[in-house]
Amino acid sequence: MYDKTVRRRRAVLALLVALSLILLTAYFGEASSGGLHSLQNGFLTVVSPIQDGANKALKPVRDMFGWFGSTLKAKSQNKRLREQLATARKQLTEHQFDQRSYHELLRLYHLDQTLSIADYRPVSATVVTQSPNVWYLTIGIDAGSSAGVRVNDPVIDDEGLIGKVSRVVSDGAVVSLITDSEVEVSARISATGTVGMLQPQVGEPGRLLMRFLTSNARATKGDYVVTSGTVVSGGESLYPRGIPIGTVTSESERSAFRTVNVSPLADLRNLGAVQVLTAPPGSRAAALGATAASLAPSEGGGDEEGGSGQVASSEASG
Amino acid sequence: MSTSSTRSTLDSATQVSAAWLPGSLLWRVAVLSVVVVFVQIGVVSEVPLFGVSVDLSPLLVAFTGLLCGSMLGAITGFAVGLLLDLSLVQTLGITSLVFTLIGYAAGRLRELRDPQAALTPLLVGTVAAACATVGYSLFEFLLGVDAPVSLELLREIVIGVLIDAALALPMWALVRRCLIGGLAEDPRRRRRRAYTTGGLSPLSRASERSR
């Protein structure tokens, strides 16, 4: 009896461990269109309406817990925002005059082909799942292909860019956040126009690195970092130009290329409502997105030849 | 303790598992697991505390093992891990593997030592949360995530484990309350009998009676 029980217990353990390892190996080795990925997509399709329902039903509970943290955070944020508002008011009046002149000149030279958020059809969505894991920086939303959402569509919230759609099913989608290791964004420092590649800072969840800045580039603490509206390689998302991403916090390293640390503006741990910027078929945004996707994929953005890849730009002629 | 008595203790302890997973207990564990996973995904994950998302799933798995034994602990760990990996679109197999080992280890602790101290769930929960986070991180490193162990990462891991430790006792009460009806023997009664009868593990007494 003892031997039989021990044998059975060990057999169950061995079977479960072996199953886990088989799943792990098969999942890791297969393409994103493979069987296990399809199974996961199917599961997501089935579960997303349930998660959506549960999410709505449990929203009051979540809001109650969130209220405490939000109140504390709001107090400090309020002070900071008041200071920023005062500065921004001054700048606004100056910029309004400059902007008017700028647009007049653009129209004069027929160069107003810049892709903006207005060229996209924003689809509102609610965050229904969020990984508790420090490694997986993805969220699930309740808008999918039936709402026009497609893979690589940019996702924003009221603070700025939060990520891009990485997987879509009919009634839901998975969004890889900008702090996910698979996401990189072409960005520029708003104040100076310096362009670089924004990547997650591995091992520092919630932090970003802006890499491949030229050695004489100027970046000061507090400068806003926005999307540049360009892509460096195929498979990347073509984010519209000028979406705020974060602020420069410090300089990271100085070599042939400079690198600065960036703190995201959006609170990526506490997302509620988001917008997916979908490009309607036949629109200029869709055409530019298709052009960007047709570029040859690079060998990752981490090579030191940064910026040497092919570049598609939302500023290109439409 | 002589070899024969040790053998007797082990024998009786493993009979918890040998009573091949009663149906009512399995149902309770299955329903509890699904509910906890959905609450985890739908509510708990979205309410960060000190900048960290709380993870109740390692506590559920460890306490199921601690109450029901190694076999059901391991099976629950595998199922909960798979459900989480599928729901959160993570690499299939990692969470299952880590949770299987956690559930099994917690179950073996109960079968071999049968700890009855009031703080046992607190310790088991803390260790389970730490093992889950560290185990997961190790697998991520092994699978090629090129991440230096930074202070920020360590801070998140430590805070996550501390929050799980704080939630261990309430979670234990919840899991115990849900599963107690399906268990062959109430652990509290078992402990009382151990105090009143003295001697070795109360499980060994049960086995002696059955002999």
Image (cartoon, coloured by chain):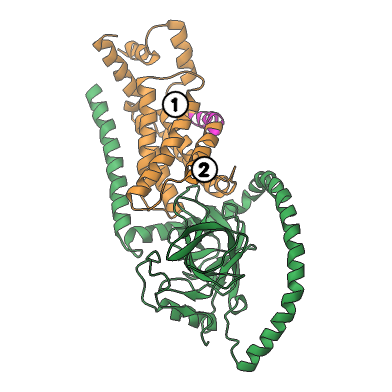
Chain colours: A green, B orange
Nearest to the observer: residue B210 or residue A257:
A257
Q: From the image, which quarter does the N terminus of chain A lie in? A: top left
Q: For mark 2, name the chain.
A: B
Q: Is residue A210 visible?
A: no
Q: For mark 1, name the chain.
A: B
Residue A103 x/y as whole percent: 67, 86
Residue B59 x/y as whole percent: 48, 35
Residue B92 x/y as whole percent: 37, 51
Query: What's under tag 1, amino acid-wise?
Result: Leu
Q: Is residue B33 visible?
A: yes
Query: What's under tag 2, amino acid-wise?
Result: Val
Q: Classify mark 1: helix, strand or loop.
A: loop
> Residue B35's mark?
2
Crowd around label 2: few <14 · some 14–19 · many ≥20 (10 Å): few
Q: Classify mark 2: helix, strand or loop.
A: helix
Which residue is rendered at x = 41% and y = 31% of the image?
A: B65
Nearest to the observer: residue A230 or residue A173:
A230
Nearest to the observer: residue A12 or residue B184:
A12
Q: Which residues are magenta?
A: B167-179
Task: Name the residue carrying label 1.
Answer: B183
| Magenta stretch, overall SS | helix
Q: Is residue B176 magenta-colored?
A: yes
